[in-house]
Image (cartoon, rainbow, N blue to C red):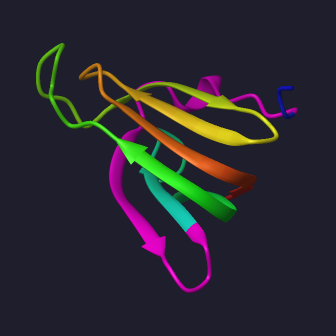
Amino acid sequence: MPVPFDSSFLHDATLVSLELAWGDGEVIFYLRTGNNPDFRLTVREVTAVTATRNFEWGPSGSVNTVTVSEQAVIVEMQSGDTITITGRFKAQV
């Protein structure tokens, strides 16, 4: 079931970095958007992390889509790669 979060503003955001705090079970996406150079998207109670970096559609550090549900956050990059974090979502501005 989707979580009420309009992620459309994250299209074209730049993925600056991704941080995994193993002991805390937390993943933080550090993103730069047109309106917010320091946007953070946090996933807590993380149980799984998967990511590809094959540049199937060509090199890009920009976000295509972000899908948020009660169980996971999936970030599809404009390179065609996906980052899937299983856990509980929290957005931070």
Work out whether 29 lies above or below 34: below
Q: Is residue 91 magenta?
A: no
Residue at the image position 42 percent from the left and 68 percent from the top:
19
What is the quadrant of the C terminus in the image? bottom right
Residue at the image position 48 percent from the left and 56 percent from the top:
29
Q: Is residue 21 magenta?
A: yes
Work out whether 79 lies above or below 93: above
Q: Residue furthest front?
A: 47
> Is residue 32 something one can see in this rendering?
yes
Residue 78 x %, y %: 31, 21
> Is residue 40 something one can see in this rendering?
no
Bounds of the magenta span?
4-26
Residue 37 placement: quadrant: bottom left
Give 2 or 47, whichever is nearer the viewer: 47
Residue 3 placement: quadrant: top right
Residue 27 x %, y %: 54, 64
Residue 70 x %, y %: 82, 40
Describe residue 10's horizontal placement relative to residue 71 as left or right: left
Residue at the image position 67 percent from the left and 41 percent from the top:
72
Label tally? 0
Residue at the image position 29 percent from the left and 19 percent from the top:
80
